[in-house]
Image: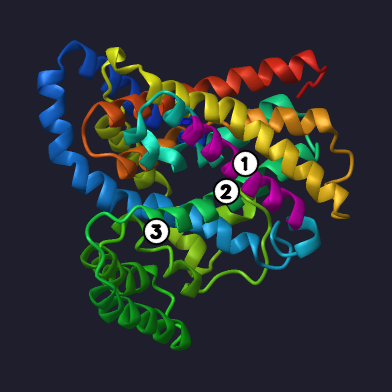
C-alpha cells in the first residue's frame, strides 16, 4: 500500500533542502566536526577529493552562476538597462574594493604579509544565502530584494574575472591556453550556428576543451563553462532570477540548469566536506581580517558607492532608503561558498589557509546580523 502523503512530505523536504542549500551546510558541519574530532583521518580524505571537487565538480556550480549572469543581460533582465543596472553594479564594485582594502590593511598592520594573497576573499558574496536573507528581512516587493540580487550577480561576475586574472592554479602558459581555448570557442559557436540543442555537446565538447585550456594554461579549470554558457541557445528575454517559468522553459540553457540543479547540490555537499574541515584552534589574524572585511568593509563599500552613484545622477530603485542599503550591505557580507573557494585558490595548505577558511565560514553570521538590524529598523517580511 502506497503513502502519497508520505511521498509528498519527502518531496517537500528535498525541495526545501535544495532551495536553502542545506546539503552545503550539512557538508560544512560534517567537515568541521570530523576535522575537530580526528583531523588525522579527515585530512587525507579531503586531500584525495580536492581535485575532483574543486577543479571538476565546481565547474557546474560556476556554470549555474554564469547562467544567471547571462540571463540578467537579456531584455527584461536586471542588467539589460544600463540606467537601472548602474547603481547596483557600482555598489557591487564598492562592495569589493572596500573589503579588499580593509583586509590588506589589517594584514599589514598585523605584521602578516603572507596573508596578502587573500585580499579577494572578502570580495565574495554568496548569491543564494544573501538572497534568502533578503527575503526574510524585507517585505515582498521591496526594491532592496532585486537590488541585492543584481548586486550579487554583478559581484559574482567580477569575482570570476578576479579569479581568472589573479589566481592562476599553475604557472601561466598563454600559448597552451590559446591553442585549446580558441578551438573550444569556435566549437561552441559552430554548435550554436548549427542550432544544436543538446547541452551535452556544449558542456562536454566545447566545455571539455575549455577545461583543458584553463588547466594546461595555468588558470583555474573550475571556470571552464563560463565562456561556453553564453553560446548555449537560451530564451529571448529574462523572466527574473529563480522565476517559476524556468522549471519548464524548453531552451538549452534552462534544460542544462534543470539537469544540474540536483547534482550541484551534492557537489556543494562535497565542497563543504572537502574545504570546511578547519580545526577551531585555527582562528587567528587571517580569520578576523576576512570576517571584519565582510561584515564592515562590504556594507561600507556598498553604501558609499550607492551614495556616490546617486550623487552622480544615477537612479536607485524607487523607495530604497539609506537604511535599506545598510541592511542589504550587511546581508551581502555572507561570503561562505565563494569566499571558501577564493580561500583555497589564494593559499597553499597551511596556517594562512586555515585562518582564512574560518573567516569565510564565520561570515554566515552576517545573515542573523542583517535580520536583527532590519528588525531594529522596523522592517518586516
The residue mark sitting in front, 2 or 1, is 1
Quadrant in which residue 226 is drawn: bottom left
Q: Looking at the rendered structure, which numbered label has been put on residue 95?
A: 1
Residue 88 lies, in percent from the top left, at 71, 49
Residue 97 lies, in percent from the top left, at 58, 44
Q: Main secondary structure of the magenta part?
A: helix
Residue 2 lies, in percent from the top left, at 38, 28
Q: Looking at the rendered structure, which numbered label has been put on residue 164?
A: 3
Mark before the other along the chain sequence, 1 or 3: 1
Mark before the other along the chain sequence, 2 or 1: 1
Measure how far apart labels 1 and 3 are at the Cα level.
19 Å
Q: Nearer the viewer, residue 248 or 43?
A: 43
User: The residue tagged with tag 2: helix, strand or loop?
Assistant: helix
Q: Nearer the viewer, residue 357 or 251?
A: 357
User: The residue tagged with tag 3: helix, strand or loop?
Assistant: helix
Answer whether residue 97 is magenta in the image. yes
**Do the numbered discs 2 and 1 sit on residues whose CB atoms are within 8 Å?**
yes
Measure how far apart labels 2 and 3 are at the Cα level.
14 Å
Magenta region, residue range: 86-105
Asked if residue 245 is positioned above or below residue 173 in the image, the reply reads above
Answer whether residue 91 is magenta in the image. yes
> Can the viewer see residue 260 in this picture?
no
Asked if residue 198 is positioned above or below residue 345 in the image, the reply reads below
Amino acid at each position: 500500500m502506497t503513502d502519497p502523503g508520505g511521498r509528498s512530505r519527502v518531496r517537500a523536504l528535498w525541495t526545501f533542502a535544495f532551495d536553502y542549500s542545506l546539503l552545503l551546510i550539512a557538508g560544512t558541519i560534517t567537515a568541521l566536526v570530523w576535522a575537530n574530532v580526528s583531523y588525522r583521518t579527515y585530512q587525507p580524505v579531503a586531500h584525495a577529493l580536492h581535485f575532483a571537487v574543486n577543479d571538476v565538480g565546481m565547474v557546474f556550480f560556476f556554470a549555474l552562476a554564469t547562467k544567471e549572469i547571462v540571463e540578467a543581460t537579456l531584455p527584461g533582465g536586471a542588467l539589460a538597462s544600463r540606467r537601472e543596472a548602474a547603481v547596483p553594479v557600482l555598489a557591487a564594485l564598492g562592495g569589493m574594493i572596500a573589503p579588499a582594502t580593509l583586509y590588506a590593511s589589517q594584514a599589514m598592520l598585523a605584521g602578516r604579509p603572507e596573508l596578502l594573497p587573500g585580499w579577494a576573499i572578502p570580495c565574495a558574496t554568496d548569491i543564494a544565502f544573501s538572497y534568502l536573507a533578503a527575503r526574510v528581512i524585507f517585505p515582498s516587493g521591496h526594491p532592496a530584494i532585486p537590488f541585492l540580487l543584481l548586486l550579487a550577480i554583478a559581484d559574482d561576475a567580477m569575482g570570476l574575472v578576479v579569479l581568472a586574472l589573479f589566481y592562476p592554479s599553475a604557472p601561466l602558459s598563454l600559448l597552451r591556453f590559446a591553442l585549446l581555448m580558441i578551438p573550444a570557442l569556435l566549437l561552441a559557436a559552430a554548435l550554436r550556428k548549427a542550432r544544436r540543442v543538446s547541452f551535452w555537446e556544449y558542456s562536454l565538447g566545447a566545455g571539455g576543451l575549455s577545461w583543458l585550456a584553463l588547466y594546461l594554461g595555468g588558470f583555474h579549470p573550475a571556470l571552464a563553462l563560463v565562456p561556453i554558457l553564453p553560446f548555449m541557445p537560451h530564451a529571448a528575454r529574462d523572466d527574473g532570477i529563480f522565476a517559476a517559468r524556468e522549471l519548464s522553459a524548453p531552451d538549452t540553457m534552462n534544460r542544462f540548469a534543470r539537469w544540474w540543479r540536483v547534482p550541484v547540490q551534492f557537489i556543494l555537499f562535497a565542497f563543504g566536506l572537502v574545504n570546511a574541515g578547519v580545526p577551531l584552534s585555527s582562528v587567528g589574524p587571517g580569520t578576523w581580517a576576512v570576517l571584519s572585511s565582510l561584515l564592515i568593509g562590504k556594507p561600507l563599500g556598498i553604501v558609499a558607492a550607492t551614495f556616490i552613484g546617486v550623487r552622480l545622477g544615477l537612479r536607485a530603485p524607487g523607495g530604497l532608503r539609506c537604511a535599506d542599503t545598510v541592511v542589504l550591505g550587511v546581508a551581502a557580507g555572507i561570503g561562505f561558498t565563494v569566499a571558501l573557494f577564493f580561500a583555497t585558490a589564494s593559499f597553499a595548505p597551511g596556517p594562512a589557509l586555515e585562518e582564512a577558511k574560518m573567516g569565510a565560514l564565520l561570515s554566515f553570521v552576517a545573515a542573523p546580523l542583517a535580520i536583527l538590524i532590519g528588525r531594529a529598523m522596523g522592517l518586516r517580511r
